[in-house]
Amino acid sequence: EVQLVESGGGLVQPGGSLRLSCAVSGFNVEMYVMHWVRQAPGKGLESISGIRGDDKFYTESVKGRFTISRDNSKNTLYLQMGSLRVDDMAVYYCAREDQLGSADYWGQGTLVTVSS
Amino acid sequence: DVVMTQSPLSLPVTLGQPASISCRSSQSLVKSDGITYLNWFHQRPGQSPRRLIYKVSNRDSGVPDRFSGSGSGTDFTLRISRVEAEDVGVYYCMQGTYWPWTFGQGTKVEIK
């Protein structure tokens, strides 16, 4: 059974850092393109980062502040977030990209709250 | 980035009646392989999104046949033939042709 489980969210002050993890099971994380998608409170979905082989992409608003990576030995995807801002506050989902060009599996999400 | 524009943003519907959501992209979603990577997702409050439709008109496994997708190029539509109570929530179109993925603003479907 395919599962994605995010963790690492929480309350952080503006300017702080946080590392999100997405532990996957039922497939090898290195064999798939993986994404981080976030959803601010009451808002829509925003794809912010993805990793395909050695290629990584970031949406403009997080470039230079966030880093996506994966540990194949732990079958886990990460998102290292730095210089956090109030507008980074959101539920962060990891998602697997299938051969159909979109997300077939999502995690349950982890909430990041940025507040002083 | 490709901009996805949905309408309407709010859709009150009567149980048993049809519903339709439109989605337009700022550029053609036909990829170099000839495939159009346009998807539809449904999200209930407090839940992760669930894909309903991929590549414009293909239903995912377990999706009722009252859901259908159509369109081409830059204009796409999701139709629900007869709305049921479990269909409430927010519907998003999403393009997977270009990185990054981009989503429409969402259409909130509620029962009148």
Image (cartoon, coloured by chain):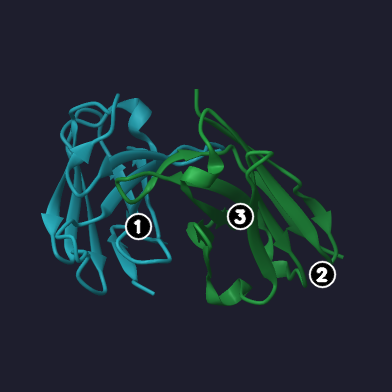
Chain colours: A green, B cyan
What crowding class fits label 1: few (fewer than 14 Cα within 10 Å), some (14-19), or many (20 or more)? some
Chain to which mark 3 belongs = A
User: Which quadrant is the C terminus of chain A positioned in?
Assistant: bottom right
Check disc 3 and report the residue beneath it: A41
Is disc 2 placed on a helix, strand or loop? Answer: loop
Task: State the image quarter where residue B42 is shown.
Answer: top left
At horizontal 36% and vertical 49% (from top left) the residue drawn is A102
Check disc 1 and report the residue beneath it: B9
Report whether A36 appears left or right of B37. right
> Which marked residue is nearer to the observer: mark 3 or mark 2?
2
What crowding class fits label 3: few (fewer than 14 Cα within 10 Å), some (14-19), or many (20 or more)? few
Q: Is residue B24 above or below residue A93?
A: below
Task: State the image quarter where residue B112 is shown.
Answer: top left
Q: Amino acid at mark 1?
A: Leu
At horizontal 67% and vertical 77% (from top left) the residue drawn is A64
The answer as to whether the residues below labels 3 and 1 share one chain is no
Q: Position of residue A4 (x, y in %)?
A: 58, 36
Q: Which mark is residue A14?
A: 2
